[in-house]
Image: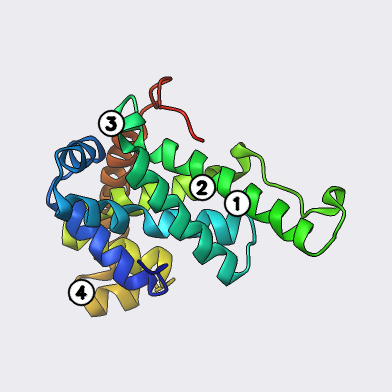
Amino acid sequence: MEAPRDHGEAAASRSELTAAGVNDAALVARCRAGDENAWRELVERFSRYVYAIAVQGFRLPQQDAEDVFQEVFARVYERLDSLREDEAVRPWIAQLTRRLCIDRLRSGARESDADLDDLPEVPAEDELTPLEDAFDVHEALAELPENCRQILDRFFARDESYRTIGDALELPPGTIASRISRCLAKLRDTFEGRNLPPSASSGQVT
């Protein structure tokens, strides 16, 4: 198992999973039933998320982030049966990742004889919210029709003008704004549908 380095490949794989209609709870249920393909899909689905928490949230160096990545999924594999609600797998994985990142920071300080009080500031859970939101948006975007994914990517990710988008998609520039507006509405509806409040009973992390 290797930490992801190609974000494009990870996003493409995630899109395929979402397009197949496999939600988190159904995927966990398949894992519980011993489906080896489901386990590989679960790792693929959450690999970029775990790595982003370690690298972007906790600023771990690459080797430490990869070690955390390996440990997270080893524990998920061992303790999946302790998860009380299958649909709560993502917050459970996030909590586990956060705990292991903190342990890694403390372990590094002890090995270097550094003062534990001098550890880098650990981000609070609410400071990791942007990573959660980005994960939700990417998955919601993957559920949109291809024409919406393409036009939103060109406008927001590539920062292309209406004229450039129109030329590329063979659409009149005057229709681009209304098309973007409609696609944003679809994205918002999809995002809000995915971003339901998590269950209060999500299992324990140890």
> Disc 2 to disc 3, how far (Cα)?
18 Å
Image quadrant containing the N terminus: bottom left
Residue at figure coordinates x 33%, y 24% from the top left: 84
Q: Name the residue under label 1.
A: 101
Label 3 residue SS: helix
Mark nearer the N terminus (1 vs 3):
3
| Residue placed most toward the observer, 65 or 25 | 65
Q: Mark 2 points at which residue?
A: 97
* Vertical relation: 57 (above or below) 111: above
Which label lies toward us, 4 or 1? Answer: 1
Residue at figure coordinates x 54%, y 42% from the top left: 129
Q: Name the residue under label 4.
A: 169
> Disc 4 to disc 2, how far (Cα)?
41 Å
Can residue 181 be seen? no
> Disc 4 to disc 3, how far (Cα)?
41 Å
Residue type at tag 4: Leu
Q: In which quarter of the image is residue 41?
A: bottom left
> Disc 1 to disc 3, how far (Cα)?
24 Å
Is the Cβ of the residue at disc 2 closer than 8 Å to that at disc 1?
A: yes
Position of residue 114 measured from the top left corner of the image (x, y, whole percent): 85, 59
Is the Cβ of the residue at disc 2 closer than 8 Å to that at disc 3?
A: no
Give the left or right position of residue 168, taking residue 89 as reference: left
Mark nearer the N terminus (4 vs 3):
3
| Residue placed most toward the observer, 85 or 68 | 68
Mark nearer the N terminus (4 vs 2):
2
